[in-house]
Amino acid sequence: MEDLLKVEDLRTYFFTEAGVVKAVDGISLDVRKGESHGLVGESGSGKSVTALSVMRIVPKPGKIVGGKISFDGTDLLTLKEDDMRRVRGSKIAMVFQDPISSLDPLYTVGKQLIEAIRANNETVSKEQARDMAISLLSNVEISEPERRFNQYPHELSGGMKQRIAIARALARTPTLLFADEPTTNLDVTIQAQVLNLMKDLKKNFNMTLVLITHDMGIIAEMTSRVTVVYAGQVSESAETHTLFYHPTHPYTEALLKAVPRLDKRKQLQSVGGNIPNLIDPPTGCRFHPRCPYAIQICKEKVPDYEEVETDHFVACHRWKELSLVGVQ
Ligand code: SF4
């Protein structure tokens, strides 16, 4: 499969009074046309900032300071802001964890959908846009779409708001959709419904999906390839089933141990310790203060990003000698 998005050595820093926070510090990522790609790691690892960098909507005091982002052959970092706005309006969309941030409380659902549809295609009349909006509401499985069309966001439940936010993203008929923790704020039953909906929509709308999450269960359920991010850098990437059954990075192993399993009565283990301070990250391998396998070299030298096998890469000095435990 062809690459749709290629991120190379991306660096996005936040210039705060306390110092420079290296939120993304050399992340590379390949997303292929039509795939569901997972971006996984604990919160604060740089996943969301990577997506915001691709969209070029990093909030201040953040700034992209290095790297290359190529989308469908276009270099996004050299595009003029007007051209980039067009890319955001019609090719790349994003659904956020908190749907409130993508919906305007002052406007009805219908008005917001119509605006998104017409931003993507100015030739669409208001009447056509209205019909398209109602049909989008049906696509995201909103009951009584005509009634919802005239309601305001505060009149809807959390699950419904997230469906509307998804509909709004789809109104732009994007080629690439970033979904950033889209179900984290929803209760478990609604989570499953929204994830199933996203799966169906991805297929029906022929989109490429980048799903950002801290939840390995969602990665297993939803994605075919995955990139694991730790402290602003990539620690491992592989096809999802390979990553689950043959992890080669201790951080991946730790994330897998933290996944609840209905069929196992094993004690859940959390990843011990905290994500490091990204103003002054640990030397060598950034995971070394938390890694049970760390040795001297890990503190001194940054590990290379090496190929384990086709489509499987890892950044760990000891991957050849460790026998890590995946899903059993
Ligand atoms: Fe652990 Fe060392 Fe590998 Fe880092 S390089 S993950 S500290 S074994």
Image (tube, rainbow, N blue to C red):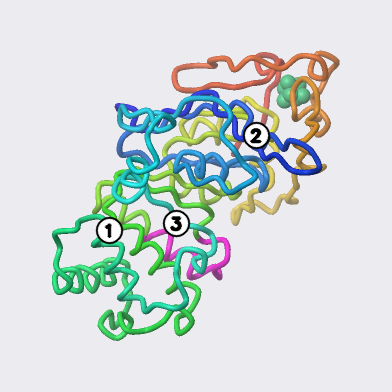
Q: CA distance from mark 3 to mark 1?
A: 17 Å
Q: Main secondary structure of the magenta part?
A: helix
Q: Residue at x 26, y 71 (%)?
A: 138
Q: CA distance from mark 2 to mark 1?
A: 34 Å
Q: Which residue is mark 2?
A: 232
Considering depth in this image, is 187 or 277 the residue closer to the camera?
277
Q: Residue at x 62, y 34 (%)?
A: 24
Asked if residue 196 is among those painted magenta in the image, a careful observer would answer: yes
> Residue 119 got which mark?
1
Q: Residue at x 38, y 50 (%)?
A: 93
Count the marks.
3
- Identify residue type, mark 1: Ala
Q: Residue at x 59, y 53 (%)?
A: 263
In the rendered image of this protein, does residue 47 appear above or below residue 97?
above
Considering depth in this image, is 203 or 76 the residue closer to the camera?
76
Considering depth in this image, is 252 or 287 the residue closer to the camera?
287
The 10 Å Cα crowd at callout 1, few under 14, some 14 to 19, many 20 or more, is some
Boundaries of the magenta span: 183-197
Q: Are marks 3 and 1 in contact (CB under 8 Å)?
A: no
Secondary structure under tag 1 reads helix
Q: CA distance from mark 2 to mark 3?
A: 21 Å
- Identify residue type, mark 2: Gly
For residue 228, side relative to residue 93 (left or right): right
Considering depth in this image, is 98 or 102 the residue closer to the camera?
102
Q: Which residue is mark 3?
A: 95
For residue 186, side relative to residue 102 (left or right): right
- Identify residue type, mark 3: Val
Asked if residue 170 is among those painted magenta in the image, a careful observer would answer: no
Q: Earlier in the sequence, mark 3 or mark 1?
A: 3
> Residue 31 got which mark?
none
Secondary structure under tag 2 reads loop
